[in-house]
Amino acid sequence: MNSKYIFGAMITIPLLPIMYFQGKRIRASVPSLPEAKGTEGTTSSFPSSKALKIITLGESTIAGVGVSTHQEGFTGTLANSLADKLGTNISWKVYAKSGYTAKHVTKKLIPRIKEPEADLLVIGLGANDSFTFNSPKQWGKDIDALIIALRKKFGNTPILFTNMPPIKLFPAFTSLIKFSMGNLVEMLGERLEQTIAKHENVFYDAQKISFENWIDKIDPSTNSSDFFSDGVHPSKLTYQVWAKETANYVVQHSLIKD
């Protein structure tokens, strides 16, 4: 994999000036959206049941950029879906920040976690590590450090890494940026799969996000542009479909039990 990264870097380095100016144009054209509000909540469908606790951590997608509240974003939808599937309430809390890498999450977010225990930890990362050209080797070290930090806080609580972001599908990006960043994020996904294999009770949903598959499941009239709020970040539709797919993974692999 390092040879693939080196080969990709050799191709990309001469193109960096072009990518730099393309990136500036993208930043100027893409609106600056805020993070979602309401970083914690509890489902209320089952008044007599004890709520299971999930904590989500990560970058802008987990921070809910593209929707107004976390209730309608990834974490709130994940909690509601899990509650329905498991027949129990779910208590949830979000620790995420737009622009954060795996290293940022370990150093800046994990120390802020106040909860003494959790039933499931869900992590969404990859885009910013790609945008900052983090190498697969260093990314593997960063993921190791993140898992170790969570183990110190939560013991053997199940940890789930969500799908890597589908950068090749971002409509706001040029073909050059889709190619270079998209290939890199796929390499990071491969290294993530190798890294978690060394840890007990850590999982990764390695299935690539496919809008075609989602459209088949939800509504044939849906367009791929409907899955984005600004050409880069997910729309409400994406958050909800993605969260429900993640809930299916959690239940199928018995990561959380009532």
Image: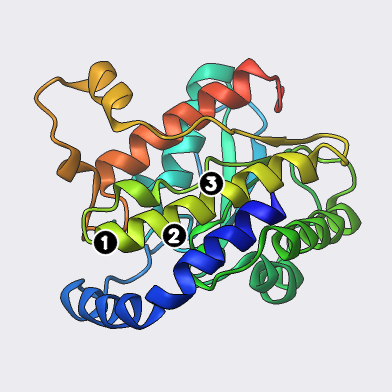
Q: Could you tell me which secondary element the residue under label 2 belongs to?
A: helix
Q: Residue at x 52, y 28 (%)?
A: 247
| Amino acid, disc 1 | Phe
| Amino acid, disc 3 | Glu
Measured from the top left, where is residue 252 in percent x and y? Answer: 62, 16
Q: Could you tell me which secondary element the residue under label 3 belongs to?
A: helix
Front-most of residues 182 and 209? 182
| Amino acid, disc 2 | Met
Measured from the top left, where is residue 110 in percent x and y? Answer: 73, 66
Q: Residue at x 44, y 63 (%)?
A: 60
- The image quarter in which residue 200 lies: top right
For the C terminus, the quadrant is top right
Measured in 3D between alpha carbons, the distance from the residue under mark 3 to the one under mark 1, in whole angstroms, is 16 Å
203 on left or right of 79? right
Residue annotated with mark 3: 186
Q: Can you say whether 88 is above or below 41 in the image?
A: above
The reply to whether dot 2 and dot 1 touch (C-beta < 8 Å) is: yes
Measured in 3D between alpha carbons, the distance from the residue under mark 3 to the one under mark 2, in whole angstroms, is 9 Å
Looking at the image, is mark 3 or mark 2 earlier in the sequence? 2
Q: Can you say whether 29 is above or below 37 in the image?
A: below
Looking at the image, is mark 3 or mark 1 earlier in the sequence? 1
Q: Residues within 10 Å of mark 3 (few under 14, many from 20)?
A: many
**Residue 98 visible to the viewer:** no
Q: Residue at x 48, y 51 (%)?
A: 183
Measured from the top left, where is residue 235 in percent x and y? Answer: 26, 49
Residue annotated with mark 1: 173
